[in-house]
Amino acid sequence: MSELPPPAERTLADVEDGLHMPLEDAILTQRAVRRLLPDPVDDAIVLRCIELALKAPTGSNGQNWEFVVVKDGEAKAGLARRYREAWRIYGGLGRWATRQDPPARRMLDAVQWQVDHLEEIPVLVVACLRGGRLPFVPLPPVGESSYYGSIYPSVQNLLLAARAMGLGAALITLPLWSTTAVRRQLGLPLTVTPCAVVPLGWPRGRYGPTTRKPVGQVVHLDRYGNRPWLGDATASARD
Amino acid sequence: MSELPPPAERTLADVEDGLHMPLEDAILTQRAVRRLLPDPVDDAIVLRCIELALKAPTGSNGQNWEFVVVKDGEAKAGLARRYREAWRIYGGLGRWATRQDPPARRMLDAVQWQVDHLEEIPVLVVACLRGGRLPFVPLPPVGESSYYGSIYPSVQNLLLAARAMGLGAALITLPLWSTTAVRRQLGLPLTVTPCAVVPLGWPRGRYGPTTRKPVGQVVHLDRYGNRPWLGDATASARD
């Protein structure tokens, strides 16, 4: 791979080839990268990530998404304030809950960094949905699920595209705890609901493998509790 | 590419190389493939898809997902009955709403096929979440969003992995309209909520590009309604 220009000078042309990364590698190495440089990110790179996000499915192909790319200092500071308010409660509880769990504590430390530096991160993408609910879908739990099922697949595409172009990214929701405040800050009409935030920037850290429970532990056959692949599922899945 | 064995004889070894497909190609050609062959799908392939699904993020890294792989005829028939019940209302409304929209009507026709043949599809993956809500997250909209934000990124990974291995897949929720009925059918405890179904099988149709609104139409800068990339965003993003 040829040497990349310094972060602030990188253009889409410098990083676009990354999108040819094998799917499996992108999936295996995509992880929350929260510590980001303040250097700007070329708009074209951000748009390319969102363009690929739009290839994800939506309920009834409604494509009822809106993405607000927040770069303005004041707007970022507003989201950062909301993040800090929520983190005051959530982070405290989290610290208590993870007092004997060093890996979880390391994650909290990274979130703490993000909370402290959110307004310095060059781009905050706020993924939103239009419409209170999908048209025609009956209301109960499945309606709720369908609704968010129309935004999070696109967010995952965005995270994978960011990873492939070497851009740091993570999925967070706490800065949105007050929908009213966020609507006011971003001028969102009542018909548009902010769902998730993806801070984007060039990483201070790096991407790498994640640790997960073995697949056999969370896969049930036909009936919950029937887990025939509970042994070494990964190995058997690869036989 | 070497000739694949007939669908029913395909093993993971035959299709696993597909996972090296460039990320961009996988994203650009992933689409709902609803018309599927009844031929069985090797368990190892299904597990591989789910294993890659598990690399997606979850709120607080809770990994509070459960995947029920439904292959049993009776369990599939139960989900098919629920699907038909919901489709009787939803499909009727959809037909009326799309009477002058041929592409949307074609999508409805594909869904109709799926509704009529759900129990013949070899595998239905039911993606579930444990816990009513994420621990420590305050309740309102953002809590709901965080909750579903812990399952749909994984579902998108699953869809991309299926696409890369040539397996047909789609994201649906209507068979789950009655959470109670589905819980009974699959033996899910009250603490586990079924969120989405992905029918998997070898495609009768094929994958291919999707059509989407131009990115500039759904991207706002700093404030909703401020759309500087409204022109030919794709071209400008590629400059």
Image (cartoon, coloured by chain):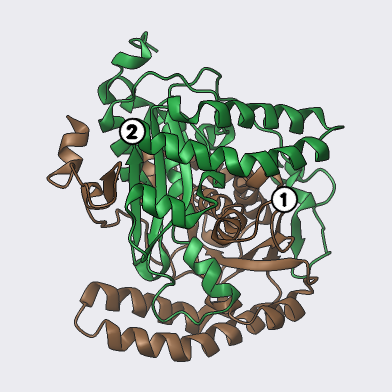
Chain colours: A brown, B green
- Quadrant location of the N terminus of chain A? top left
How many C-alpha atoms fall within 10 Å of the one at disc 1: few (<14), some, or many (≥20)? some
Residue labelled with disc 2? B71
- Quadrant location of the C terminus of chain A? top left
> For residue B123, which quarter of the picture?
top left
Identified by mark 1, the residue type is Phe
Q: Secondary structure at mark 1?
A: loop
Q: Please determine whether, in this image, residue A145 is positioned above or below residue B92.
A: below
Kindly give the residue lying farthest to the right in the view shown: B100
Seen in the image, is A96 located left or right of residue A129? Answer: left
Q: Please determine whether, in this image, residue A131 is positioned above or below residue B49.
A: below
Q: Which mark is residue B25?
A: none
Q: Secondary structure at mark 2?
A: loop
Q: Please determine whether, in this image, residue B229 is positioned above or below residue B48.
A: below
- Asked if one can make out residue B120 in the rendered structure from this viewpoint, the answer is yes
- Asked if one can make out residue A173 in the rendered structure from this viewpoint, the answer is no
Residue B4, given in percent of the width and then of the height, sits at 36, 12
Kindly give the residue lying farthest to the left in the view shown: A231
Seen in the image, is A147 located left or right of residue A168? Answer: right
Residue at the image position 58 percent from the left and 50 percent from the top: A154
Residue labelled with disc 1? A136
Identified by mark 2, the residue type is Lys
Q: Marks 1 and 2: same chain?
A: no
Residue at the image position 57 percent from the left and 68 percent from the top: A39
Mark 2 chain: B
Mark 1 chain: A
